[in-house]
Image (cartoon, grey):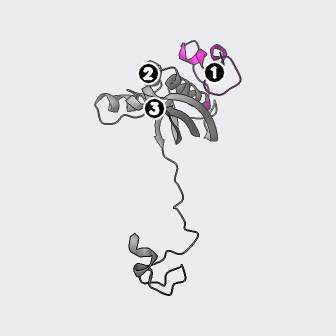
Amino acid sequence: MKCPCGFDAAFEDCCGRFLSGKLQPQTAEELTRSRYTAYAKRREDYLEDTLHPRERTKAARGKTWAGGARSEPWARDATWDGLEIRELERGGAEDKDGVVSYSARYTLKGVSHTLEERALLEKHRGRWFYVKAEQPEQAPAVRDQLKVGRNDPCPCGSGKKHKKCCGSSQ
């Protein structure tokens, strides 16, 4: 069976090695891929085990969900459809921290969704851990055309004010 993380490898030869505990992820990308696979396989034990210990402590006190100590009901109910790693910042085997930007596609109650995140990961005692995620900044929406004000001439060309013409029904 192909690994849910998207690599063209069998689950046992890819993320399965990490979820079974046989090996530890050596890079931030491997940890991110294996955590995605844990969501797809509903392995909350792995999600909790790979959550940074300081974040796990916060989650246990109920101060933060922190992305995995106890997965949200929607995450458990979703069908995970694919992972795309968009950008890596640091996170190699010799690094102490890293950032992995990714898109995760999932279906919930028959509706397709995309989750965009920047995962912040750190090495602690030689092992990679998930710390938290940030939502990427989105550019503000920009109009192609100017907004028609209520007192501006109606764009239909009638010569009336917009509020007395086409804008009266809005």
Residue at 55%, 83% in the rendered image: 157
Q: Position of residue 141 (x, y in %)?
A: 52, 62
Is 29 left, or right, of 160 in this rendering?
right
Q: Secondary structure beneath disc 2?
A: helix
Amino acid of disc 3: Lys
Name which of mark 3 and mark 2 comes first in the sequence.
2
At 49% from the left edge and 74% from the top edge, which residue is drawn?
Answer: 147
From the image, tell me which residue sits under label 2: 44
Q: Name the amino acid, label 2.
A: Glu
Q: What element carries label 1?
A: loop
* In magenta segment, residue 51: no
User: If the image is split into quadrants, where does the N terminus sit?
Assistant: top right
Q: Where is residue 54 in the image (x, y as percent from the top left)?
A: 39, 31
Q: What stretch is highlighted in magenta?
A: 1-29
Given this view, does label 3 or label 2 mark the residue nearer the observer?
Answer: 3
Q: Is the magenta stretch mostly helix, strand or loop?
A: loop
Q: Name the residue tied to disc 3.
A: 109
Between the C-alphas of marks 2 and 1, the distance is 17 Å
User: Which comes before the other along the chain, label 2 or label 1?
Assistant: 1
Q: In which quarter of the image is the C terminus?
A: bottom left
Could you say whether the residue bearing mark 3 is in a helix, strand or loop?
loop
Q: Position of residue 139 (x, y in %)?
A: 54, 59
Which residue shows up at 40% across the image and 28% down it? 71
Q: Residue at x 48, y 25 (%)?
A: 50
Q: Which residue lies furthest to the left in this view?
A: 61
* Mark 3–mark 2 CB contact (< 8 Å): no
Q: Which one is nearer the viewer's eye here, 80 or 122? A: 80
The residue singled out by tag 1 in the image is: 3
